[in-house]
Image: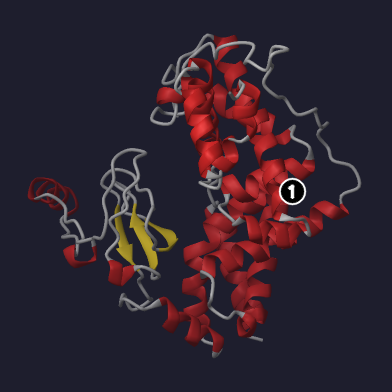
């Protein structure tokens, strides 16, 4: 697919505000609010990407560019930028890092550290521990770069390392702080029909709306309350995007067992969200949107 | 004829595109005449995306700076 450029009008407005001109050759995709934008120039797939956060001018690392990335409106994703601002293919960065080039490794770290931190924070529920895992992960990655064969994305490889560090910590915890609740499931009549219709049609537009602050809390609580084995699978698959095979390998379980846990976790969380909308009588996109 | 329970049991496989064609056709046939299940499928599918957004975490600048310092100190040795 051909890369899209900003419209002349929006580019003129942006230039007026910032006094700078966006290097159009590097604009590879634009998206609408919470809509997927998949127009990544083929020659840039597999490069590290950054996104210019609108109005702030900050650059946020996106990780490896691949189809299916989602961008905020007018957030300009850029191809990988090395310290000297040149486009550097991921393979080259990896090769340099393997030879001990610290700046090249730091570029790889910069592109993935936000996601690694998020994964660790969700798994462990502690900022301090997540920060420690972040350091352990990249130290392990640096020490193991020679073993990285490059047949998987660098980001996936690093996420697996981070997930492994988190799982080791979780295994060492004797007692989980939060009490675990039983998994919720939909109710059926004796004939196998759904006992009730969802009260609010939240699936219709909830994904497009700003998240209700109370819903965010309800989801956090419901996720924390999942049995550990289900919570791990749900977070690693649905939130952090690891493959079934990777998760099965990390947990020492079969892929069907992982899928079964994922399904039950999704059902339980769906029930919690459904309960939230029914109890609050809220429709998606209500007050307190974030 | 599938029941709602049968249908919900295979939603994950269906959405992953891993349900055998015959079973997928039976599920779609049930969905064609069961509004609660259509709504259930829609909310089941939305659950992951909603959770992903609700659980998004931001890397604090201080943690990023600590990581940079840690790596420079440890990796230059």
User: Is A287 drawn above or below residue B54 in the view shown?
Assistant: above
Q: Quadrant of residue B4?
A: top right
The residue under the point 70% across, 67% down is A136
**Chain for mark 1?**
A
Work out whether residue A271 or residue A49 is closer to the camera in this orientation and state it.
A271
Residue A126 shows up from this direction: no
User: Is A212 drawn above or below residue A198 in the view shown?
Assistant: below
Work out whether residue A242 or residue A22 is closer to the camera in this orientation and state it.
A242
Figure label count: 1
Mark 1: few/some/many CA within 10 Å (<14, 14-19, 20+): few
The residue under the point 40% across, 70% down is A46
Work out whether residue A30 or residue A17 is closer to the camera in this orientation and state it.
A30
Give the farthest residue toward the bottom.
A99
Task: Give left or right: position of A167 versus A215.
Answer: right
User: Is B11 drawn above or below residue A8 in the view shown?
Assistant: above
Q: Which residue is mark 1?
A: A257
User: Is B11 drawn above or below residue A38 in the view shown?
Assistant: above
Q: Quadrant of residue B14?
A: top right
The residue under the point 40% across, 27% down is A209
Q: Position of residue A86 (x, y in %)?
A: 30, 77
Work out whether residue A21 or residue A77 is closer to the camera in this orientation and state it.
A77
Q: Position of residue A95 (x, y in %)?
A: 49, 86
Task: Give left or right: position of A184 versus B56.
Answer: right
Q: Position of residue A192 (x, y in %)?
A: 67, 17
Q: Quadrant of residue A204?
A: top left
Q: Position of residue A69 (x, y in %)?
A: 39, 53
Residue A47 shows up from this direction: yes
Local SS, label 1: helix
The residue under the point 17% across, 59% down is A20
Quadrant position of the C terminus of chain B in the picture: bottom right
Quadrant position of the N terminus of chain B in the picture: top right
């Amino acid at each position: 697919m051909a890369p899209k450029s900003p419209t002349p009008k929006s580019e003129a407005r942006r230039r007026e505000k910032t006094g700078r001109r966006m290097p159009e050759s590097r604009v590879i995709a634009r998206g609408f609010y919470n809509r997927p934008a998949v127009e990544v120039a083929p020659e840039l797939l597999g490069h590290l990407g950054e996104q210019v956060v609108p109005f702030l001018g900050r650059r946020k690392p996106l990780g490896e560019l691949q189809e299916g990335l989602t961008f905020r409106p007018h957030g300009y994703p850029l191809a990988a930028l090395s310290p000297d601002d040149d486009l550097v293919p991921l393979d080259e960065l990896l090769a340099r890092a393997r030879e001990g080039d610290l700046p090249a490794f730091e570029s790889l770290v910069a592109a993935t550290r936000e996601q690694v931190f998020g994964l660790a924070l969700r798994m462990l529920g502690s900022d301090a521990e997540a920060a420690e895992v972040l350091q352990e992960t990249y130290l392990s990655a640096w020490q193991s770069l020679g073993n990285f064969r490059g047949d998987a994305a660098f980001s996936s490889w690093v996420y697996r390392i981070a997930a492994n560090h988190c799982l080791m910590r979780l295994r060492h915890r004797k007692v989980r702080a939060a009490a675990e609740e039983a998994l919720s499931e939909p109710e059926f009549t004796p004939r196998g029909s759904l006992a009730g219709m969802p009260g609010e049609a939240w699936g219709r537009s909830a994904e497009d709306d700003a998240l209700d602050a109370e819903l965010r809390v309800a989801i956090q609580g419901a996720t924390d309350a999942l049995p550990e084995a289900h919570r791990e699978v749900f977070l690693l698959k649905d939130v952090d995007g690891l493959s079934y095979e990777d998760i099965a390998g990390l947990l020492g379980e079969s892929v069907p067992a992982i899928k079964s846990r994922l399904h039950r976790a999704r059902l339980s969380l769906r029930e919690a969200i459904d309960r939230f909308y029914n109890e609050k009588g809220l429709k998606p996109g209500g007050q307190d949107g974030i | 004829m599938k029941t709602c329970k049968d249908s919900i049991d295979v939603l994950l496989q269906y959405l992953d595109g891993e349900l055998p064609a015959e079973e997928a056709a039976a599920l779609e046939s049930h969905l064609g005449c069961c509004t609660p299940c259509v709504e259930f499928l829609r909310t089941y599918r939305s659950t992951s995306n909603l959770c992903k957004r609700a659980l998004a975490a931001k890397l604090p600048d201080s943690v990023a700076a600590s990581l940079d310092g840690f790596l420079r100190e440890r990796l230059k040795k």
